[in-house]
Image (cartoon, rainbow, N blue to C red):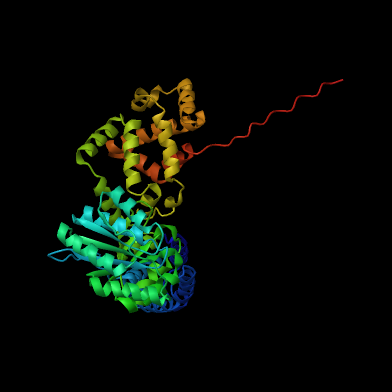
Amino acid sequence: MFDALSQKLNGVFRSLSGRGKITEANISDAMRDVRKALLEADVNYHVVKQFCKDVQTAAMGAEVIKSLHPGQVMVKIVQDELTRLMGPVDTRVYYVSPGPTIVMLAGLQGSGKTTTAGKLARYMRDKNHKKPLLVANDLQRPAAIDQLCTLGEQLGIAVYKEDGVKDAVRVATNGIKHAKQSGYDVVLLDTAGRLHVDEDMMNEIAAVSKATNPHQIFLVCDAMTGQDAVNSAKEFNDRLELDGVILTKLDGDARGGAALSVKAVTGKPIKFIGVGEKLDNIEEFHPDRMAGRILGMGDIVSLVEKAQEQYDEEQAKKMQVKMAKGTFGFDDFLKQMQSVRKMGGFSSLLKMLPGMGGLGEMNVDDREMSQIEGIVHSMTAAERSDPDLIDASRRRRIARGCGRDSQDVAGLVKTFRRSREMMKAISGGGAGGMNALKGMMSGKTDMFSAMSAAGKTKQRSKRKKPPRKKRR
């Protein structure tokens, strides 16, 4: 997300870094480039105009003019303004007592409401320790009820439905009655998708809202529709009085204009963002963290939170001892890969590290990680424990077992040995550890690239030398 915008903004800051001081002239030039970058990212025109005006006003302050590091100062100013533009946001979901808390999801057709309902129910159960009930209130789309029931079955969350009924108000009210009688803490109403210009459908959702009196109404918007998402949010808010917006498919939108525009245009905050297809790929929206990601400053807080979800103190201590002794094996490597996958993959994690946004563009996707896992699973237990056992004949056997080239296996084993030595040096500390760390950061070991390359099929053309002509 925001890849194109991040690259262009960083280009603007690099050009300012070469200047001795900030002047009105170079600020004007920089803001012209910022304005262009934001418009290309599909940010609302009026939002761009006001944003650039606010940044320019802040940049022309006396303290900024005297600064000897104009690029750094501009990054801070733009970060503050981006945070202000998208916030403030209170990401908490407020629950009533006694329950159930009624949450209604509305949105356009195809915006991802049903999947979001499942994600939100999982979030409330796992994060807030609530007992949610999903109510299948989408009576328009074929198979919408079946889809919600499938999600409920995958998550182990109950779904209320009424087959053959076309009265959305009746299903919603009966679902709430069932939740009260059965002791559910939260009711999530998955309503039908509708166009904001469809008067009959808008009247239907208004009737459901009036009958159920939901405690919170969230609009689910597809981030990839850009300004259409913002315009629909404005129309829905006029009819329903929204409490917040959930932006879906933000991981597939390299521009991110909707995220930057929706709060300023509608006045309603983004509460959650969908960042993937998996049912745990929903995050609370934090404007300050998002501003850091846009500017390539990383998001350490989110990274730590993701790591804490996967953290096992006892296992971490054992892993640290193995790294220090140099006995870290392929089985340990697989466990780490599985943890990384649960945290979103190598690319998304690298983007959360300050200054590592460029590395996040490396194509280390789930498919490549699966290919690496395939190589490791083709090894024997002894080989996974001690990679030094893997000689040429074993490499050929492993390659046949996983359908890869023997040189792919050799590349992975070689990189693993080098990485293990590096981890041992770092764990040992001292000058050797620092030198190894510097080597890794400067790209000398190129661990991630080599791991990625090991998972790809190498196309090699074998050229045969033409036979020599016999002299007559």
| Left or right, residue 169 beside residue 347 | left
Where, by quadrant of the figure, is residue 77 drawn? bottom left
Residue 192 versus residue 383: which sits nearer the camera?
192
Q: Which is nearer the eye, 97 or 339?
A: 97
| Rendered position, 386 above or below 152 | above
**Side of 33 relative to 309 (left or right):** right
- Which residue, as the protein is rendered here, is positioned at the far right? 472
Between 470 and 227, the one nearer to me in the picture: 227
* Quadrant position of the N terminus in the picture: bottom left
Residue appearing at x 34%, y 79% in the figure:
238
Q: With 132 as the anchor, is 229 left or right in this view?
A: right
Residue 334, percent from left and from top? 34, 36
The residue at 41%/57% (across/down) is 251
Q: Is residue 95 left or right of residue 412?
A: left
- Identity of the residue drawn at 37% across and 79% down: 57
Farthest front residue? 164
- In the rendered image, residue 436, in percent from the top left (x then y), is placed at 36, 39
The residue sitting at 24% across, 44% down in the picture is 311
Asked whether residue 267 is in view, the answer is: no
Residue 331 visible in the current orientation: yes
Q: Quadrant of the C terminus?
A: top right
416 shown above or below 229: above
Q: Position of residue 65 (x, y in %)?
A: 37, 75
